[in-house]
Image (cartoon, rainbow, N blue to C red):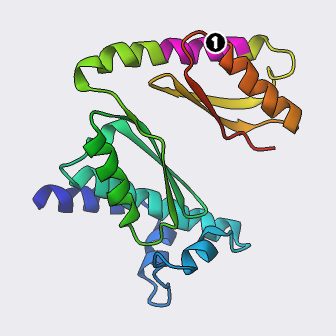
Amino acid sequence: MKRGLLILATVALMLPPAVLLAQQSPTTPEVKKTAKADEAAKPSGDGAGQAMKDSWITTKTKLALTTDNRTKARHISVETRAAVVMLRGKVSSTEERTAAEEITRGISGVAYVSNALQIVPDEQRKAVDAKDDGIETAIRERLLKDTQLKDAAIKVRSDNSVVTLRGKVQDPKAKSHASDVVRGIPGVRAVKNELAL
C-alpha cells in the first residue's frame, strides 16, 4: 500500500499542472465500456486536449501495472492514441499477458486495448533480448541504405522477433516498401506496420 502511494505521489509530481487540473474537473465524464467508448476513441478536434487525455491514460495504466503484483511493468511499454492503449514488450507467461490487458481495460477512459505483448519465459529473456537488439540494428542499417526510406523518420521495435514500425512516410508505396524491407531481415517473424502517411 505504501509503495503504491509513493509511486502515485511521484507520478503526480512529474505531471504538468494542466494534466492534474484537467483530471480534477468535476465536469469530466468517465468513459464507460459502452457505445460511448467508440465516441471517446474519435479525436474531439482539440488535438491538445486529446493528447492530454491520452497522456493521462498512459500514466494511469503504467501506475496500475506497476502496483499490481501480477505484472512486471518494467517490461511493458504503454502508448495511448485516441483512448486506444497499445501494450508492447515481453512478459513471462500467458497469465501475465492476460493480467496486463485486464488491468488496462479497468482504467477509466480506455476505449480499446491493443495487446501486442510477446510471451518469453524468464530463462529465455537474455537470448531473446540479444536477438531483438540484433534485428533492430539490422533493420535500421537497411533502412538507412534504402534510397526510398533513408530520409523517413521510422522507429523500429522488435519484441521476440515481431517488429513494429512507427513514424511517418511520404506515401502508401513507401509504407508498403518498408514492410518488404523488414521482412527481408533474417530472424523477423512478423511485421506490424503502424507507419502514418
Is 89 left, or right, of 63 in this rendering?
A: right
Residue that appears at 51% across and 11% down: 134
Q: Where is residue 71 in the image (x, y as percent from the top left)?
A: 25, 45
**Where is 191 relative to 183, above or below?**
below
> In the image, is residue 116 part of the stretch drawn in magenta?
no
Q: Where is residue 91 in the image (x, y as percent from the top left)?
A: 32, 36
**Where is 130 relative to 53, above or below?**
above
Q: Position of residue 132 (x, y in %)?
A: 47, 18
Quadrant in the picture for the C terminus:
top right
**Where is 53 relative to 147, above or below?**
below
Q: Where is residue 57 in the image (x, y as percent from the top left)?
A: 46, 63
Q: How crowded is mark 1: few (under 14 residues within 10 Å), some or many (20 or more)?
A: some
Q: Nearer the viewer, residue 197 or 184?
A: 184
For the view shown, which residue lies furthest in the bottom direction? 27
Segment tinted magenta in the rendering:
133-142
Quadrant in the picture for the N terminus:
bottom left
Residue that appears at 63% across and 76% down: 39
Q: Main secondary structure of the magenta part?
A: helix
* Residue beneath disc 1: 185
**Where is 45 relative to 3, above or below?**
below
**Is any atom of residue 13 visible in this view?**
no
Quadrant hosting residue 104: bottom left
Is 44 left, or right, of 151 in this rendering?
A: left
Q: Nearer the viewer, residue 57 or 102?
A: 102
Quadrant hosting residue 120: top left
Is 86 left, or right, of 127 in this rendering?
A: right
Looking at the rendered structure, the kind of residue marked 1 is Ile
> In the image, is residue 135 part of the stretch drawn in magenta?
yes
**Is any atom of residue 194 visible in this view?**
yes
Q: What element carries label 1?
A: loop
Residue that appears at 30% across and 58% down: 64
